[in-house]
Amino acid sequence: MIDPRAIIDPSAQIGSGVSIGPWSIIDADVEVGDYCVIDAHAIVRGPTRLGCRNRVYPFASIGDATPARAYAGEATRLVVGDDNVFREGVTVHRGTVQDRGETTIGNRNLFMAYAHVAHDCVIGDHCTFANNASASGHVTVGDWAILGGYAGVPQYRSIGAHAMVAGKSLVLKDVPAFVTVAGHPARVVSLNLEGLRRRGFASEALVNLRAAYRLLYRSGLRTVEALARIHDLPDPEGHLAILTRSVSESRQGIVRPRRGRDHDD
C-alpha cells in the first residue's frame, strides 16, 4: 500500500495498514499511525506524530517549520490525534520554543481545502475549518467549534467549544463557548442554537444556555457580575461551566455584540 515513488526517510515510523501515494514525502522523525492514508504529492515533515486513521489529501503540508521570525530552527513538534481529515492544500506548522514547542490537534477534525493551523495552536476534537479558514500562532480552538470559509483568527485568540465563526469573519477578541460570531471585526450575533440542536442538546440545556447568554450579553451587567449570576443557574450537564470558563480565562477580552443587533434565537 506504499507506492514505490513515495519518498520516505528511513527513520520514519510507519504503522500497519498505511497507504502512501506517489510523489508524497514522509520526512525524518515522522510517526504515521495505523491505517492512515497519505495521498499523492502530500508532505509530512518532522518531528511529527500522526495518530491512527488520519487522511492527508494531495498538496497538504503537515508538520513543516513555521515562518515566524522568532523561530530559529529549534526542535519543536506537531502532535495529531486520530481520525482527522486534511484536505487539499492544508498547511499545519510545528510549534516554537517561545511558547509550548508543540502544535496539538485532537481527534476527528475536518480541515477543508487550504485551511491553515499555525505554530503552537491547540485544536480540540470534532472541529471544522472550512475552506481557507486560518488560525494564527498560539490560537486555542475548543471542541466542536466551526470556522467558516476565509475566517481569520489572529495570534493568541481563543475560540470556545461549540462556537461558530461565520465565513469571512475577522476575530479580534476571544469567542466564548456556544456563541455565533460574524463580521469584520467579528461581533456576537446569537447562541449557536442550530449547531447545538444538531448535536442533540436537550431542550432544558438550551433554555439554561439562553438564560446565561442573556445575562452575559443583554442584562447590562458587568462581565464579572454576569458570571456570578450564571453560576446560580442550574447546570446539570456542565455546559454553563464551559461557558463561564471560556469567559473568565479570556486573555484578549471577549467578543461583544454590535449594539442593537444581537439576538438569542
Image: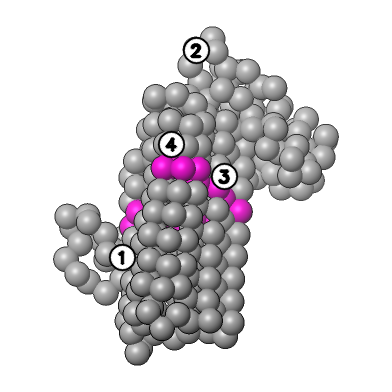
147 with respect to 98 (left or right): right
Residue contact between numbered discs 4 and 2, judged by CB atoms under 8 Å:
no
**In-image side of 223 versus 45 (left or right):** right
**Mark 3 or mark 2, which has the lower sequence index?**
3
Q: Nearer the viewer, mark 1 or mark 2?
A: 1
Determine which residue is flagged by label 3: 145
- Horizontal and vertical percent for residue 214? 65, 23
Separation of residues labelled 1 and 2 (CA atoms): 42 Å
* Residue holding disc 4: 151
- Point 39% across, 40% down: residue: 153
Whole-percent x and y of residue 60?
Answer: 40, 60
Which circle's residue, 4 or 1, is located before the other in the chain?
A: 1
Q: Is residue 242 above or below residue 212?
A: below
The region drawn magenta spans: 117-133
For discs 1 and 3, the disc positioned in front in the rendered view: 1
Q: Earlier in the sequence, mark 1 or mark 3?
A: 1
Q: Secondary structure at mark 2?
A: loop
Is 131 included in the stretch rendered in magenta?
yes
Q: Quadrant of the C terminus?
A: top right
